[in-house]
Image (cartoon, helix red, strand yellow):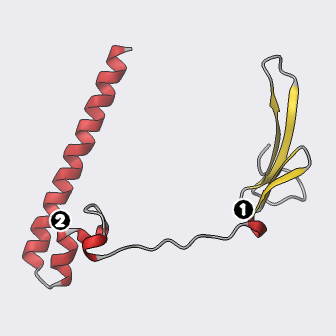
Amino acid sequence: MIGKVKGKPTDYFNGSIKNRENKETSRFLGTYLGYIDFDDVRYWSYDSVTPHRIYFKEGPEALESDHHNRTDLTNLKQGNLPVAQVEKERLEEDQRRDRKLREDAEKKKKAKK
């Protein structure tokens, strides 16, 4: 059951794990943002987790696909609007082509079944 337990937070969940014979082997409960318990043992709690800071690299250390390297944005920041527009359109064409390739591959995959 998820989120419909009276007196519990909306992200509350509970349930059980069953084996092939439909026999319950474990029970669990918790909240998506708070904790999770299996058989009355707390396995994870937000209070005991230290979030990790993610550092984004710019410049030559950044991945080629990083948003800092988008040619349309770099030209826009430099005030070169005509080139930025051309680059934006090129990027959109690439995205449309990639989407079509994915859709075609999915159609072929379904046709083989």
Is 82 positioned to the left or the right of 113 in the image? left
Image x and y of residue 47, in percent: 77, 69
Above or below: residue 78 compared with residue 1? below
- Tell me the distance, in whole angstroms, between the alpha carbons under discs 1 and 2: 38 Å
Q: How many numbered circles does the render carry? A: 2
For the C terminus, the quadrant is top left
Label 2 environment density (alpha carbons within 10 Å; few <14, some 14–19, many ≥20)? some
Q: Residue furthest bottom?
A: 79
Image x and y of residue 81, in percent: 12, 79
Picture residue at 77% right of the left edge, 58% below the top: 10
Above or below: residue 74 compared with residue 112? below
What type is the residue that disc 2 sits on?
A: Lys
Label 1 environment density (alpha carbons within 10 Å; few <14, some 14–19, many ≥20)? few
Picture residue at 24% right of the left edge, 39% below the top: 100
Task: Of the two numbered discs 1 and 2 on the same chain, state the one appearing first in sequence.
Answer: 1
Image x and y of residue 20, in percent: 78, 18
Q: Which mark is residue 67?
A: none
| Residue 15 picture quarter | top right
What residue is shown with label 1? 33
Picture residue at 77% right of the left edge, 47% below the top: 2
**Mark 1, secondary structure of its residue:** loop
User: Dots 1 and 2: beta carbons under 8 Å?
Assistant: no
What residue is shown with label 2? 88
**Mark 2, secondary structure of its residue:** helix
Q: Nearer the viewer, residue 25 or 5?
A: 25
Image x and y of residue 37, in percent: 84, 50
For the N terminus, the quadrant is top right
Is 5 positioned to the left or the right of 66 in the image? right
What type is the residue that disc 1 sits on?
A: Leu
Above or below: residue 111 compared with residue 59? above
